[in-house]
Amino acid sequence: MTSIRKKLLLTLIGAMSLVLLIGAWATYGAAREEANSIFDYHLEQIALAVRDQDFNGRTGALAGDERLEFVLRIWDRNGLSIYYSRPHGELPDVARLGFSTERTASGAWRIYAVQHRGQTIAVAQPMSVRARIAAASALRTLTPFVVLLPLAALLIWFVVGRELRPLTGLADSVARRTPDALDPIAERGVPDEALPLVRALNDLLTRLHTALKTQRDFIADAAHELRTPLTALQLQAQLIERANDTDSRQAAIDDLRAGLERATHLVAQLLTLARAEPGAALPTPDAVDLVRLCRQSVIDHAALADARRIDLGLADGPADLAVTGHADALRTLLDNLVANAVRYTPPGGRVDVRCGSDGTNAWLEVTDNGPGIPEAERERVFDRFYRRAGQSASGSGLGLAIVQAIARQHDAQVTLDDAPGGGLRARVVFAKRG
């Protein structure tokens, strides 16, 4: 599992350590340079301090204090050494006036030389001594960095923990949600960076709440709708048992068969609607020929139309028209529209099926010259199990709900309006796809 807290701590502490190390290295170098500058200043000051001393006549090497880490040597105008603070030491000859660094068998020396009244005064210091003292001084400047690093790590740990605390609260808030309590998560106090996540979760919770409510309503409605035909089947079975003659028994059997057909149709409609629900597994979309689809639907419903003396036909349209979708689902959509039109159009009426394109969007259309649907009810007829007043009880009340669900699967829009000359026109317009 990847931990944001651990990543932040490691990244921030690592970055802080790197910055402190770079700063310490720069400080160490600057401190050494500063110490060397001070040592050079001391060399110069010593040389200037002794330039007015009279060393004439003192040609011997004078012993100096061995504890003195500076070495003083003076030459007269003839190049003879008239003073040497470390007679047994080794000091290189002065090559030039001012500051210079010279090497001898005993190591490198830093020398400052100046001439005064014909004398050459040189003050020298071993570079090893300078390096040791400068390093010690520079290391002392690093003490704050050594102390600050763990303090900075503790501060980072505290700040990261405090700033991530809202995420822990957010996780607890999500964990408290149940199928019966899908309230939106409060956005108050949520960091700006987490707001998109909270809003996405709230949108998901809203859709989940809607889906669960729809599912519960669907189950309740399905159970209610199935109860009636199943009860009727039980009564018809009892009538068969009580039948005293062949005619009564045959009539009861016919009623039972019709009841079974209605129950089977209702179950088939319920399964179709379940497959059309959002989130249901769908096959890979393919090109669907709308002209062929309309022609086959007319053929399939021809017998029902003839039985009801309905003039069912395919209106003139394009020779070839296709949309991307699922052939079986679109066949179910069109069959429901055609079946409804044939069922509710009075005998002697007319039902026309057509398809076409307006240049941008393809469409399917079923028109009839039946009683139509009042405008006030055209939205409600898409509700599951809704039946209009006076509608035949043989219908399941799911046909248009299935049409609507399949249309949404295909990014299509279903509209109901008045047909030319009276009746109803059901039109499905498919959105243009890239």
Image (tube, rainbow, N blue to C red):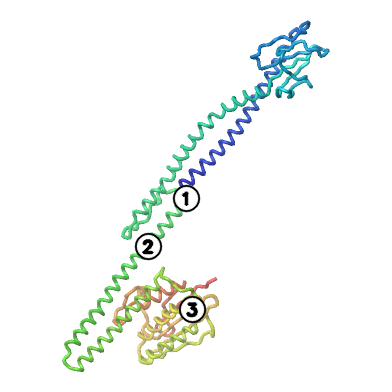
Left or right: 123 with respect to 254? right
> Residue 193, labelled with which disc?
1
Say above or below: 336 vs 66: below
Provide residue 147's location: percent of width, then percent of height.
50, 31
Residue placed under numbered mark 2 in the picture? 208
Quadrant of res 122: top right
Q: Residue at x 76, y 13 (%)?
A: 74
Judged left or right of residue 365, residue 63 is: right
- The answer to whether the residue labelled 2 contacts the one labelled 3, judged by CB atoms less than 8 Å apart, is no
Q: Amino acid at mark 3?
A: Trp
- Near mark 2 (Cα within 10 A), the count class, few <14, some 14-19 or many ≥20, is some
| Callout 1: SS | helix
The residue at the far bottom in this view is: 246
> In the figure, residue 378 lies in which quadrant?
bottom left
Residue 298 in view (yes/no): yes
Which residue is labeled 3 in the image? 363
Give percent across and percent down for residue 148. Answer: 51, 33
Mark-to-mark CA distance, 2 and 3: 32 Å
N-terminal label among 1 and 3? 1
